[in-house]
Amino acid sequence: MLAGQSVGYRGAVLTPSSAGGVVYHDDAVLVVSPSGTISAVASIEAGRAACPLIHDLRGSLLVPGFVDAHLHYPQTRVIGSASGPLLTWLERVVFPEEARFTEETYARAVAKEFALRCAERGTTTVGAYSSSSPLATNLLFDALRESGLRAVAGLVLMDQRCPEAVRVPAAQALAACREIVSRWHGFDGGRLAVAIVPRFAISCSKELMQGAAAVAAEHDLCVMTHISENPREEAETLVVHPWARDYLDVYETVGLVGPRTILAHAIHLGPAAWDRVAERGATIAHCPDSNFFLGSGAMRLAEARARGVTVGLGTDVAAGRSFDVRRTVACAYDASLLTESAATPAELFTLATLGGARSLGLAERVGTLEPGKEADFTVLARPLHAAGEQGALRAATFAAELAPVTRTYVRGRLVWSRS
């Protein structure tokens, strides 16, 4: 961008609307102010009048940056490691890999890879789980700082029912959370934010979860955790926490469920639990690729839709097999058909952008290409046959191979380019 001057980006523009539905412009100028916010989506004439410099991206499609509402940084290198259902997979693949993240050199290298993999697939915002290592978590934030990406991320909390190499006692983990909050929360005008991340109820004592809820309330932080991913996990949760009436009640009782809570998976929640999710204003990270890979089941999008529960999409790397949110979109479409929750491309495009932003508490800043929002956007190479609004929706949802990402911007700053 030119210092002190607006910059325009000319091309087709597709965006969800904050009021509902999607808005499409076949040829327009996205005007970005010197502060990195969107001034307008203007006609060509108005764009020329507003911008001393217009990047001609005709033949491309400009969309809001994809928001990955749920993924795991320390699982970057174990994508595709098939070894059975959730608890077996954690034991055989995930915990041994996450134990490596006390090694500074390894953790730093993977953090850089993680940020690159997100940016090159057009993801501008991540809801990221670190490992239980404070060192690795600080290195993740440092890599995100350097990359220019937007993130809500946190130290993974687990003090029981896990290998000793990844277990951190409650007092020590909560102290580390507070240090990470003091260092990173609100960094760069809120581009980076810290979340409280109890891994899941099995691996967290009641003491740890109560302390985590207190830290979240003290600093008004997001809470990110897993729920109802696998029937065996659900049963084991109530063995570990016999005082709870169901899985959701574990989190409710300790104070972890509210409008800033993002619950991942939610496959096996019953109607009463769904009602309570809605009543408390919690949101859902829908992770269909991961759900299929581990044989966990398929979340019924209709349950959330019927109750007005906000849903974002998560790749859930590494049970999810790709950093590409559009692969998750395709899996979400398949899951919607299997569960009689049929979703349209426009709905899924919205979940992949504005839905994720809403889940992470960022919808006032990002998720759409509307005036006043920060200019987080992705440029897709648009196939010639993908004409009009419906062609644009196909390119932005199901045609990742035919419409690859060519550029990724955060606050109007280029953070990745294919060339």
Image (spheres, rainbow, N blue to C red):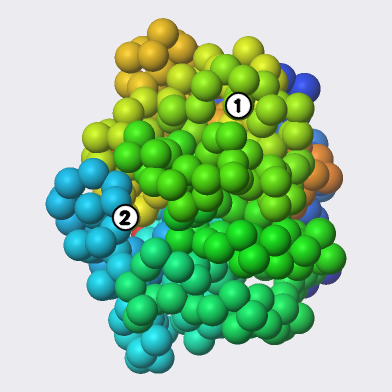
Which residue is painted at 54% across and 68% down in the image? Answer: 157
Q: Which residue is mark 1?
A: 273
Near-viewer residue (134 or 168): 168
Which residue is painted at 49% across and 59% down in the image? Answer: 199
Contact? badges 1 and 2 (CB < 8 Å): no
Looking at the image, is mark 1 or mark 2 nearer the viewer?
1
Q: Position of residue 154 (x, y in %)?
A: 58, 67
Q: Position of residue 203 (x, y in %)?
A: 46, 61
Can the viewer see residue 45? no
Q: Can you say which quadrant of the picture contains the C terminus?
A: bottom left
Circle 2: element type = loop
Farthest residue, direction front: 242
Q: Can you say which quadrant of the picture contains the N terminus?
A: bottom right
- Amino acid type, label 1: Ala
- Amino acid type, label 2: Ala
Q: Is residue 52 left or right of residue 147?
A: right
Near-viewer residue (413 or 151): 151
Q: Position of residue 371 (x, y in %)?
A: 81, 40
Q: Is residue 129 above or below residue 352?
A: below
Circle 1: element type = helix
Q: Which residue is mark 2?
A: 318
Can the viewer see residue 260? yes
Residue density around tag 1, few if under 14, some if 14–19, many if 20 or more, within 10 Å:
some
Near-viewer residue (189 or 413): 189
User: Where, by quadrant of the figure, is residue 105 drawn?
Assistant: bottom left
Q: Position of residue 216 (x, y in %)?
A: 75, 62
Precedes in sequence: disc 1 or disc 2: 1
Residue density around tag 2, few if under 14, some if 14–19, many if 20 or more, within 10 Å:
many
